[in-house]
Image (spheres, rainbow, N blue to C red):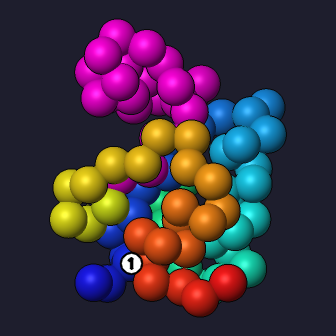
């Protein structure tokens, strides 16, 4: 799986979003950051994916799988990282 198509939907004020970004950066996993505060379409997508709730971070992977508010261990497992 190539990681270039990972999209993290979040907001700068969100601690879980900052943690997920930090995890990805520390493990050199490329991703696209999409700020739901600045992007109305992204906000709508997050709500659609989460049954009407705006839960962040919502992370969409290249295989179209989704993790919502994942822990670092969940991210590691999904990405095949031994941590």
Q: Is residue 83 above or below residue 67?
A: below
21 vs 38, left or right, is right
Whole-percent x, y for residue 32 in the image: 48, 60
On whether residue 53 falls in the magenta region, the answer is yes
On whether residue 78 falls in the magenta region, the answer is no
Residue at horizontal 30 percent and vertical 16 percent from the top: 51
> Quadrant of the image for the C terminus?
bottom right
Residue 41 visible at all:
no
Whole-percent x, y for residue 25 in the image: 69, 75
Frontmost residue, 74 versus 44: 74
Q: Which contiguous range is marked in magenta?
A: 36-60
Residue 82 falls in which quadrant of the image? Answer: bottom right
Residue at horizontal 53 percent and vertical 61 percent from the top: 74
Q: Which residue is mark 1?
A: 3
Residue at horizontal 55 percent and vertical 74 percent from the top: 76
Residue 78 falls in which quadrant of the image? Answer: bottom left
Q: Is residue 58 above or below residue 6?
A: above
Frontmost residue, 57 versus 38: 57
Whole-percent x, y for residue 31 in the image: 49, 67
Residue at horizontal 56 percent and vertical 49 percent from the top: 70
15 vs 38, left or right, is right
| Residue at the farthest left position | 63
38 vs 3, left or right, is right
Residue 35 falls in which quadrant of the image? Answer: top right
Q: Is residue 71 above or below residue 52?
A: below
The residue carrying pointer 1 sits among few (fewer than 14), some (14 to 19) or many (20 or more) residues within 10 Å by Cα, namely: some
Whole-percent x, y for residue 12 in the image: 74, 38
């Amino acid at each position: 799986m190539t990681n270039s198509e990972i999209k993290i939907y979040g907001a700068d004020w969100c601690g879980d979003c900052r943690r997920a970004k930090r995890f990805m950066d520390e493990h050199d996993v490329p991703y696209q950051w999409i700020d739901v505060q600045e992007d109305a379409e992204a906000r709508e997508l997050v709500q659609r994916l989460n049954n009407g709730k705006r839960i962040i971070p919502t992370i969409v992977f290249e295989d179209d799988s989704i993790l919502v508010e994942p822990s670092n261990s969940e991210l590691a497992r999904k990405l095949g990282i031994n941590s």
